[in-house]
Image (cartoon, rainbow, N blue to C red):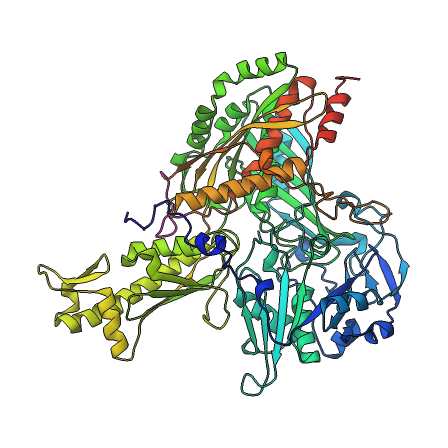
């Protein structure tokens, strides 16, 4: 472990630049002659567009164009694609009715885009947008996920009877039913995984340019926009929306102020600014304000589930069965059908020996903003269902949650272990992680703390969640590095930092392999012209996939340098070893530095470089235990989180400080969903009632205690050479069930068995009153 290498808790090298105000985000980019675009959005959740008269808006001062779906269709612009359709029961297909860039004939959620106004100034575009007044015929709407399949519910798409987009299953239904038939005890739980609005710190921005003279006179588009992988955005836009070769598109992603999955996708505004730039002959800028983000950014979660657990007479799990209704929103976002099915259901075994698991998912359309991946992408939903069900089952049979888990855990001696859902865990000690957490929180002393709180008129609870997730194995990743004669190395890589600290972590990998110091390394991301093989960021894949690609590039780089060092030292390559940025002839003091070799390479007209690619379909399985201790004021329903402990197994750690930041941030987002964030639509009109930060409550610093984190490196991943396991999403996966389990534990003396998220003070107060406490 070198001073700057793998395992060191270095402060982020990015922070100095960002804290000095030297960051460059999408809205910081200014181009000569640029103009402004405004999206006109539907005020109705469901309505027929009777007429869309754009005459007045087109005649407004400063307006360069006002466009509707008809204009896009005339130019052959394609719909926003569903990139992950799933095969349902009996081979049935996902219903894909289309997701137009601008609404055709009908609008299907509040905020659905109906027109795009381009003008010289932002004020002129806004003024003209107010003159776009489509004539709507309002239609009934359905916004409640659980009610979407009701025969009386309004029909959103003719192609999806009963609003059913996909009816999907995983597992052996017959074998699972047989296990339930033999069970000594069956416990069940109905639960809601509430819809959340992502609210990245930086709103989405898109700046489109079209140069008709570029690309040998064939014309070329350039898009500046924050995302999670410039190459993917380029390829998707080219193939699905513009039907042109990807070489005609250049996507540049500058600094990104948070994404959490939400900026992965193709949105209408990306298509509109590029297409409009070609139409008006000027660069076109669009920037969301916060209220608009509530209406146009992909939202997430929104599941209604019933889960059952079959137990034998000794409290061992025989089978798990779950039925989930998952909202898609009004349209299919890029990966929407995959998130609650193929991304979530494989984790329904959790960390437990469960011989049979059967999961069925009904994906439904509702008159709401489309949903898609958000930090964890299906795995938080799975962990919440499993860990709430495990806790509930323990209480139902009169056991402690720890004892019930201990009896049913997958144990280290059975690893690698293939679950009933087809996932193979390679490494870890799941019971030991729970024990570490229990010891750290003084589990044995909790009863005394509970009694003391009760004497003070408060209810105290202690809850745990033992989570596992699958991550880090999607597709391919490429890296290329070049060293200049002064020893400065530039790394190009296709992953995209959104605040995680990639430049720091990748710099540490390079320092470990090449012996360089951080200020000798520049990491470049976010330019689709620089690499051919990339996968982008998502699913906690960057260190696993990106790190392995860097390792491959380092191997090539070192061997090329070794050959050149052999020439310089007049020695055979086999006699030269490399260590700490120096090539030395074994058994002598004759040596050349890496910088000297790079200088020689440059003199010869062939800069010293290396390229690497990594392809992998094997996941990593980070796991751990979250513990939450809280108190409830029965007079107000207010919850105070007193302690929060996390014990995590992320395998080999590149930078423990960066990992801690990821866990803290994910836990804060999980707490927000569990206790505060309430996405509320009006059941009659379909209006988004929580459409601003005045109505949608995000967690603040005083909502969280200091998070006590223990990182365990005893169980490196065995399926990649680095031994790493993904870490970016784990905090959000373990937090929700730990917090709700603690809340249920606090109120269990009152007979409360479950409270749905978000457990707001009002919801908790009502649960206490319904239990007969207070007036």
Would you say residue 183 is visible in this rendering?
no
Q: Residue furthest left?
A: 588
Residue 236 in view of the camera: yes
Residue 732 position, x and y percent, is 56, 42
Rendered location of residue 333, percent (x, y): 67, 58
Tell me how many marks there are. 0
Residue at the outermost front position: 20
Q: Is residue 123 left or right of residue 261?
A: right
Q: Is residue 656 above or below residue 548?
A: above
**Could you tell me what secondary structure mostly forms the magenta stretch?**
loop
* 387 drawn magenta: no
Q: Where is residue 331, by image quadrant?
A: bottom right
x, y percent for residue 269: 68, 65
- Does residue 500 appear to the left or right of 344 in the view shown? left
The magenta region covers 714-724
Image point 49% across, 26% down: which residue?
A: 407
**Residue 88 pos. (x, y %):** 66, 54
Residue in view at x 70 percent, y 26 percent: 637
Which image quadrant: the C terminus? top right
Compare residues 591 and 415 and report the one nearer the observer.
591
Q: Is residue 418 left or right of residue 109?
A: left
**In the shown orientation, is residue 422 left or right of residue 201?**
left
Looking at the picture, tell me which residue is in the foreground, 495 or 315. Answer: 495
Q: Is residue 243 above or below residue 101?
A: below
Q: Which residue is drawn at 45% across and 71% down?
A: 530
């Amino acid at each position: 472990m070198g001073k700057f290498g793998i395992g060191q808790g270095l402060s982020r090298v990015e922070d100095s630049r960002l804290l000095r105000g030297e960051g460059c985000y999408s809205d910081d980019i200014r181009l000569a002659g640029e103009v402004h675009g405004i999206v006109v959005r539907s005020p109705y959740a469901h309505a027929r567009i009777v007429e869309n008269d754009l005459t007045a808006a087109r005649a407004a001062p400063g307006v360069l164009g006002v466009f509707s779906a008809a204009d896009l269709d005339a130019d052959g612009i394609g719909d926003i694609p569903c990139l992950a359709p799933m095969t349902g029961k009996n081979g049935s297909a996902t219903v894909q009715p289309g997701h137009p860039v601008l609404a055709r004939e009908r609008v299907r959620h509040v905020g659905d885009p109906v027109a795009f106004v381009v003008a010289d100034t932002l004020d002129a575009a806004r003024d003209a947008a107010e003159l776009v007044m489509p004539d709507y015929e309002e239609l009934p709407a359905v916004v409640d996920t659980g009610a979407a399949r009701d025969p009386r519910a309004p029909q959103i798409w003719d192609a999806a009877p009963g609003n059913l987009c996909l009816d999907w299953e995983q597992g052996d239904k017959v074998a699972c039913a047989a296990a339930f038939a033999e069970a000594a005890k069956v416990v069940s739980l109905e639960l809601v995984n509430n819809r959340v609005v992502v609210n990245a710190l930086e709103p989405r921005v898109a700046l489109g340019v079209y140069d008709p003279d570029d690309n040998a006179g064939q014309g070329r588009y350039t898009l500046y926009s924050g995302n999670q992988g410039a190459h993917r955005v380029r390829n998707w836009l080219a193939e699905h929306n513009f039907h042109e070769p990807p070489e005609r598109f250049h996507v540049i992603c500058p600094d990104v102020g948070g994404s959490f999955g939400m900026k992965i996708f193709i949105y209408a505004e990306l298509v509109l600014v590029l297409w409009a730039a070609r139409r008006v002959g000027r660069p076109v800028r669009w920037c969301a304000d916060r209220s608009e983000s509530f209406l146009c950014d992909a939202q997430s979660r929104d599941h209604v589930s019933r889960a059952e657990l079959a137990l034998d007479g000794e409290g061992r799990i025989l089978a798990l069965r779950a039925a989930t209704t998952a909202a898609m929103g009004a349209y299919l976002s890029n990966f929407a059908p995959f998130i609650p099915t193929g991304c979530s259901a494989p984790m329904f075994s959790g960390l437990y020996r469960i011989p049979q698991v059967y999961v069925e998912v009904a994906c439904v359309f509702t008159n709401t903003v489309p949903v898609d991946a958000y930090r964890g992408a299906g795995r938080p939903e799975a962990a919440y269902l499993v860990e709430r069900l495990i806790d509930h089952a323990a209480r139902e049979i009169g056991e402690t949650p720890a004892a019930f888990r201990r009896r049913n855990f997958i144990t280290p001696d059975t690893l690698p272990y293939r679950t009933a859902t087809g996932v193979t865990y390679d490494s870890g000690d799941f019971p030991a992680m729970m024990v570490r957490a229990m010891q750290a929180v003084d589990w044995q002393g909790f009863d005394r703390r509970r009694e003391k709180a009760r004497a003070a008129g408060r209810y105290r609870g202690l809850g745990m969640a033992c989570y596992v997730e699958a991550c880090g194995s999607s597709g391919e990743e490429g890296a290329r590095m070049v060293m200049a004669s002064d020893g400065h190395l530039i790394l190009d890589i296709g992953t995209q930092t959104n605040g995680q600290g990639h430049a720091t972590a990748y710099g540490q990998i390079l320092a470990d392999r090449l012996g360089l110091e951080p200020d000798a390394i520049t990491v470049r991301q976010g330019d689709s012209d620089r690499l051919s093989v990339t996968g982008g960021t998502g699913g906690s894949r960057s260190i696993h996939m990106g790190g392995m690609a860097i390792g491959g590039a380092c191997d090539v780089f070192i061997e090329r340098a070794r050959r050149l060092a052999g020439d310089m030292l007049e020695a055979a390559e086999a006699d030269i070893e490399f260590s700490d940025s120096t090539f030395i002839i074994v058994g002598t003091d004759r040596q050349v530095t890496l910088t000297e070799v790079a200088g020689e390479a440059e003199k010869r007209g062939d800069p010293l470089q290396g390229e690497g690619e990594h392809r992998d379909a094997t996941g990593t399985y980070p796991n751990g235990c979250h513990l939450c201790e809280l108190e409830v004021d029965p007079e107000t329903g207010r919850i105070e989180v007193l302690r929060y402990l996390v014990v995590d197994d992320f395998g080999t750690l590149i930078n423990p400080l960066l990992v801690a930041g990821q866990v803290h941030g994910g836990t804060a987002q999980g707490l927000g969903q569990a206790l505060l964030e309430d996405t509320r639509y009006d059941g009659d009109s379909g209006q988004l009632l929580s459409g601003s930060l005045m109505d949608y409550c995000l967690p603040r610093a005083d909502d969280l205690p200091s998070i006590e984190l223990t990182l365990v490196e005893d169980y490196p991943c065995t399926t990649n050479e680095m031994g790493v396991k993904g870490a970016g999403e784990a905090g959000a996966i373990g937090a929700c069930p730990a917090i709700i389990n603690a809340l249920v534990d606090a109120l269990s003396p009152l007979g409360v068995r479950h409270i749905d998220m978000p457990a707001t003070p009002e919801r908790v107060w009502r649960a206490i009153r319904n239990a007969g406490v207070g007036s």
